[in-house]
Image (cartoon, rainbow, N blue to C red):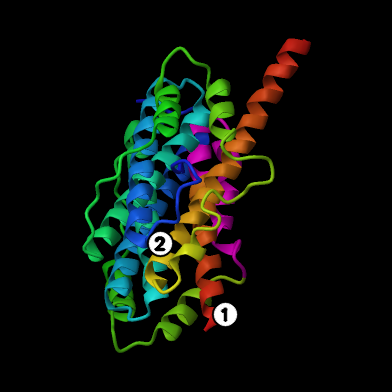
Amino acid sequence: MLRQEAGRERPPVAALLDEFQAAERAGADAVRRWIAVCHEPRLRGGLRVIEARDRGHAALAMARLRALGAPATAVVGHELAALCSLLGASGISDRSKLAALLARFPDGAHDPLAGIADQLAGDDETRALLETIADDERASLAWLRGIHQVLETEVTCRTRD
Amino acid sequence: MPDAGLGAGRGPVLRFLDDLRAAEAAGATVFEAWAAVCAADALRGGLRTIAEREAGNATLLADRLGELGVPCEAAVRDSLRFAALARFGAAEVSDDDKLGLLLARYDDDHAVGRPIARVLDELDPDLETREILRLVAAGEQATIAWLRAYRGQG
């Protein structure tokens, strides 16, 4: 569910898929490392699904790239690489990781892939592929916000007690 | 063998997880077969994601059952699986007929997640599995909602 930095020139379909697969793969790898050091069972459960979904999304984007005859050459940018490094690190709290991850999605943003469909006019298969992937991303984002809220509330209550 | 704190309710809950795993694995093969013969680009794109989602759910559940020391034994009946593959993997059956057949099983988009929702409370001691299932249910609802929306556009 981690996209590359925005603000670049609008890419063609293949470039978009390539950047997406690289970001999803890097995200899945980072979440896998996070799971390995996460001791909160609720968070670990959801992260396992998010990792599996992201890895599946990367595979779907790769398959679509192959079908379009395009190579996969993208690498993740510095900002995303730094976030992935933080997520996979030990010694950083789960709450801090959640806060860093959710900071990429401002309040009210529910769709990490918003606007992508507009770039895919004329390629219905890729558009539908990304539409349905976006459903997963929305569910992941909503779940992450929910568990973040739960963990923050629990800390607040413990502090108050 | 870890029992995840499920206690006396362990048997039925674990059986449900294994049944769900088998259903998701079978569902993945059916959606793959449908995508392979689907001539509508937009539907095919969605079916590919849905097949991947179902396969991912099956793997997640199999992994979790393995961690809980439970063998994966459930299987969708061959007759049911073969019939579904024959119907949904048939190029001569229209996409609209397939969509109608599938969507007729669910009154609304949330119906598909209700059996899972009923089990969530019983998983309260096993919070890791509970959250896995919560997101699996969200994926199931997304699948039905997308297919229903696609059919509505047709």
| Pointer 1 or 2: first along the chain | 2
Residue drawn at x 63%, y 25% is A151
- Which chain does the residue under circle 1 lie in? B
The crowding category of the residue bearing disc 2, from other C-alpha atoms within 10 Å (few below 14, some 14 to 19, many at least 20), is many
Q: Which residue is mark 1?
A: B152
Q: Are marks 1 and 2 on the same chain?
A: yes
Residue B90: which quarter of the image?
Answer: bottom left
Label 1–label 2 contact, CB within 8 A: no
Residue drawn at x 56%, y 70% is B106
Rendered image: mark on residue B50: 2
Is B131 inside the magenta-drawn segment? Answer: yes
What residue occupies the far front of the structure in this picture? Answer: A9
How far apart are the alpha carbons under marks 1 and 2?
18 Å
Instruction: Report x, y in % for residue B97.
Output: 43, 85
Figure check: B120 above or below A69: above
Q: Quadrant of the C terminus of chain A?
A: top right
Rendered image: mark on residue B118: none
Residue B60 visible here? no
The amino acid sitting under disc 2 is Ile
Give SS at disc 2: helix
Residue drawn at x 56%, y 73% is B149
A147 sits left or right of A47 in the view? right
B4 sits left or right of B30 in the view? right
Boundaries of the magenta span: B108-134
Residue drawn at x 32%, y 56% is A60
Looking at the picture, tell me which residue is in the foreground, B67 or A104. Answer: A104
